[in-house]
Amino acid sequence: MAVNNAMTADFLRSAYGGESMAHMRYLIWGDSAEQGGFPNIGRLFRGVGYAEWAHAKNHFNVLKQQVGDSTVAAGAVFGHTSIVENLQGAINGELHEIDQMYPVYLETAKFQEEKDAQKSFHYALEAEKIHAKLFQDAQNAAKDGKDIGSEAIYVCPICGFTEIGDHVDHCPICGVKKDVFKSF
């Protein structure tokens, strides 16, 4: 199904750009966390980075018939400092998406009756809520000089749902079976 409305298409491109940058930023911060003695926080960054890739992929696929060059403006957190500050950057980015970006994008897609965009924005919004909490918990540990636990981190490749440990049989956001989740 093609995207019929220019505003929703612009929002999809912006979200794609933001998620792509988050993906790369989290990979960089993951390496930094590992090198700084926080290997499990490093895995969390890489796992959530994979979730951000899933969001970018979804947005990109909704735009599959929007062929051609496009300038993509997207907000991004920059900086590469301490583990606590990197986690704060991640929290700030996730909260921006939860509180401002995705609610507006989702309501616009609903108003414009763009079903595929609605699903893509909904998946990202719900996963970002989880990511913000995971990063906050990791930051609380890092402030005390501690790493998070070593349990596996599971990520749904469809919607980006992320969990630490093995607690669900099906994704609570998109419903896919857990056997397709990627582990970190």
Image (tube, rainbow, N blue to C red):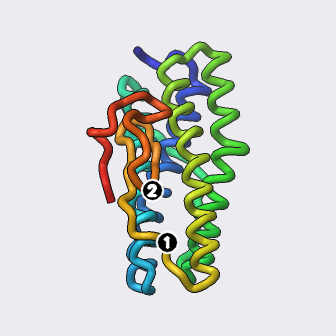
Q: Residue at x 63, y 29 (%)?
A: 106
Q: Residue at x 39, y 79 (%)?
A: 34
Q: Label 1, label 2: how many angstroms apart (C-alpha)?
A: 10 Å
State which quarter of the image contains the N terminus: top left
For residue 11, what is the image quadrant? Answer: top right
Q: Which residue is mark 2?
A: 164
Disc 1 target residue: 148
Disc 2: CA contacts within 10 A as few (<14), some (14-19) or many (>=20):
some
Residue at the left extreme? 179
Taking the image as drawn, is residue 60 in sight?
no
Q: Is residue 3 visible?
A: yes
The front one of 99 and 62 is: 99
Q: Residues within 10 Å of mark 1 (few under 14, many from 20)?
A: many
Secondary structure beneath dot 1 equals: loop
Residue 65 position (above or below residue 102): above
133 in relation to 60, above or below: below
Residue 73 at x, y = what percent? 57, 48
Residue 121, percent from left and from top: 55, 33
Residue at 37 percent across and 36 percent down: it is 169
Amino acid type at circle 2 is Ile
Of 64 and 128, nearer the camera is 128
Q: Quadrant of residue 152?
A: bottom left
For the image, the number of numbered tags is 2
Q: Are marks 1 and 2 in contact (CB under 8 Å)?
A: yes
**Label for residue 124?**
none
Residue 111 x, y percent position in the rendering: 67, 16
Residue 107 in the figure: left or right of residue 121: right
Give residue 170's position: percent from left, percent from top. Answer: 39, 33
Which type of secondary structure does the marked residue at label 2 adopt? strand
Query: Which of the pair 183/2 is nearer the observer?
Result: 183
